[in-house]
Image: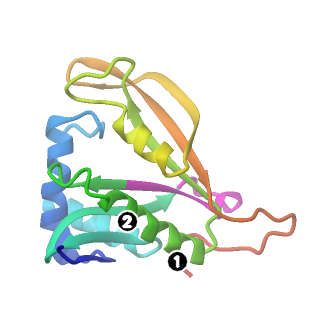
């Protein structure tokens, strides 16, 4: 069995992560982004997110097969215990358990930061098609996320309208006198 490693992403990973992401931009409605970002833009995204939140990659036998990161849910102090999470796996690396391993590691880091609520925004088809299925929602539900909101026909890609859902997972204890945390990493 090949060795699987999860580690923080570096700027040196940007080209590989962009390669993984480009497939989703060009061939799916999983992201509503129309154009693949430039390498410089993607490096900037990694750098900006990594200053405050975990940005992890998963590799097997030295090859990066996916990444996951957290980011600001809303930028007001009252939301400091909540963040948005995102995951992308190489299109040929699905069904190997890598997504669960990656999200488990991300969740563990977020718990140490004092995060209590995890949110994810997912493109959701009214009817599945070649660009978008319900697999992402099913994956998150399997990991304990619940659908908490649905926006109808709010994303337009490939000449068709798609819904978007928000899913939530509570990972900590909510106290009446909750200790203050600041945005992102401690």
Which residue carries the number 2 mark?
101
In the depicted structure, whether residue 30 falls above or below residue 75: above
- On whether residue 119 falls in the magenta region, the answer is no
Residue range corresponding to the magenta coloring: 73-86
Q: Which mark is residue 185?
A: 1
Q: Position of residue 167 (x, y in %)?
A: 53, 42
| C-alpha gap between disc 2 and disc 1 | 21 Å
Is the image coloured rainbow, by chain, by secondary structure, or in one colour?
rainbow
Secondary structure beneath dot 2 equals helix
Q: Is residue 13 left or right of residue 31?
A: left
In the depicted structure, whether residue 45 falls above or below residue 25: below
Secondary structure beneath dot 1 equals loop
Q: Is residue 151 left or right of residue 39?
A: right
Q: Position of residue 171 (x, y in %)?
A: 63, 61
Q: Which mark is residue 92?
A: none
The image quadrant that residue 4 belongs to is: bottom left
Total marks drawn? Answer: 2
Farthest residue toward the right? Answer: 176
User: Of marks 2 and 1, which one's residue comes earlier in the chain?
Assistant: 2
């Amino acid at each position: 069995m090949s060795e699987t490693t999860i580690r923080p992403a570096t700027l040196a990973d940007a080209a590989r992560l962009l390669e993984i992401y480009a497939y989703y931009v060009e061939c799916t409605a999983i992201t509503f982004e129309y154009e693949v970002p430039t390498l410089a833009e993607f490096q900037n995204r990694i750098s900006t997110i990594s200053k405050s939140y975990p940005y992890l990659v998963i590799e097997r036998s030295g090859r990066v097969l996916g990444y996951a990161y957290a980011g600001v849910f809303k930028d007001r102090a009252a939301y400091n215990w909540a963040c948005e999470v995102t995951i992308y796996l190489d299109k040929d690396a699905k069904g190997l358990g890598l997504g669960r391993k990656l999200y488990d590691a991300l969740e563990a880091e977020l718990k140490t930061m004092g995060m209590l609520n995890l949110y994810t925004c997912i493109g959701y088809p009214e009817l599945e098609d070649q660009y978008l299925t319900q697999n992402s929602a099913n994956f998150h539900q399997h990991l304990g996320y619940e659908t908490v909101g649905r926006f109808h026909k709010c994303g337009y890609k490939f000449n068709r309208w798609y819904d978007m859902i928000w899913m939530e997972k509570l990972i900590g204890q909510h106290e009446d006198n909750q200790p203050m945390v600041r945005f992102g990493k401690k």
